[in-house]
Image (cartoon, rainbow, N blue to C red):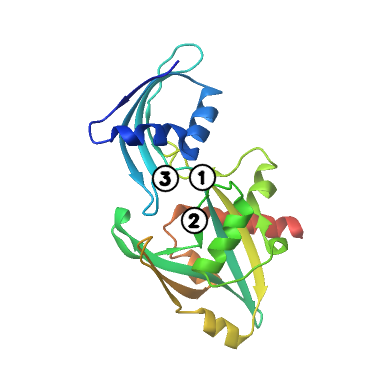
Amino acid sequence: MIEYTYSPEIAEADRLVILESRIYKDWLEKTQEKFVVTKVHFASVDFLRKGRQPLFIKLDATATLPDGRPVHGIVLVRGNAVGVLVVLRCEGKKYLLLVRQPRFAISEQASLEIPAGILDWTGDYRKVALSELEEEAQIKADDSELIDLMDFWYKGKSEGFAASCGLLDERIRLYAIERDVTPEQLKAMDGKDQEYTEEIEWIKTVVLPYEEAAHEFIDGKNLIALFLYERWLDAQK
């Protein structure tokens, strides 16, 4: 039995909502398979702007390995995510379709990233990947176009790579798609603006030559996606 406590800022009406949320229940189920959890203190919770669905849950757990050794228990629970590397081929050259958006946490006004998003309540990675492609990159893709880089690399052993395993529960499942485009299509994909005021997202698409883009990456998921895509290409040979 886990003993639960809450910081004063968490309303009593929200406590059951947190315990019943998909992201917390998924995290707890996986955690209890390998650790013994006796206490959980909820320090804070941030909700989606629509409804009262938890988006981020910060907690401090009292937990041990099965043999009794204690472990660091501070976790920021946010659930899993997806990312898609978009490779465009035009007149014998390769390009990447990326997005720029503000990232306050790393003090960047225009962070360069692959299209990505948090896994929704469906738990369907491929569906969310296609949705993010359409929303962020303005690309309508078919499920058959998705190259599952996680299945290729991990052979079904992992849902995704850990973005920051000392704090976040998040694992990011990565895909790639390849498209042959004309010069006109390539130009039309560059510089599109998307504004999603309710989600506070300001996104601009950008098309960059393949190698040039790679040398601008600081976002971890970009680099991992590129690394796995290169390995996937080698395997096709």
- Spot occupied by residue 88 in the image (x, y as percentages of width and height): 61, 73
Q: Residue furthest right?
A: 237
Sequence-wise, the earlier of marks 3 and 1 is 3
- Spot occupied by residue 51 in the image (x, y as percentages of width and height): 40, 50
Q: Residue furthest front?
A: 13
Q: In the rendered view, does 131 fall on the left or right side of 68?
A: right
- Spot occupied by residue 205 in the image (x, y as percentages of width and height): 46, 73
Q: CA distance from mark 3 to mark 1?
A: 15 Å
Q: Amino acid at mark 2?
A: Gly
Q: CA distance from mark 1 to mark 2?
A: 9 Å
Kind of element beneath mark 1: loop
Kind of element beneath mark 2: strand
Front disc: 3 or 2: 3
Q: Which mark is residue 53?
A: 3
Q: Disc 2 designates what residue? A: 117
Sequence-wise, the earlier of marks 3 and 2 is 3
Q: In the rendered view, does 114 fall on the left or right side of 77?
A: right
C-beta proximity under 8 Å, tags 3 and 2: no
The picture quadrant where one finds residue 10 is top left
Sequence-wise, the earlier of marks 1 and 2 is 1
Q: Which mark is residue 80?
A: 1
Name which residue lies at 50% across and 11% down: 67
Kind of element beneath mark 3: loop
Q: CA distance from mark 3 to mark 2?
A: 16 Å
For the C terminus, the quadrant is: bottom right
Name which residue lies at 38% across and 46% down: 52
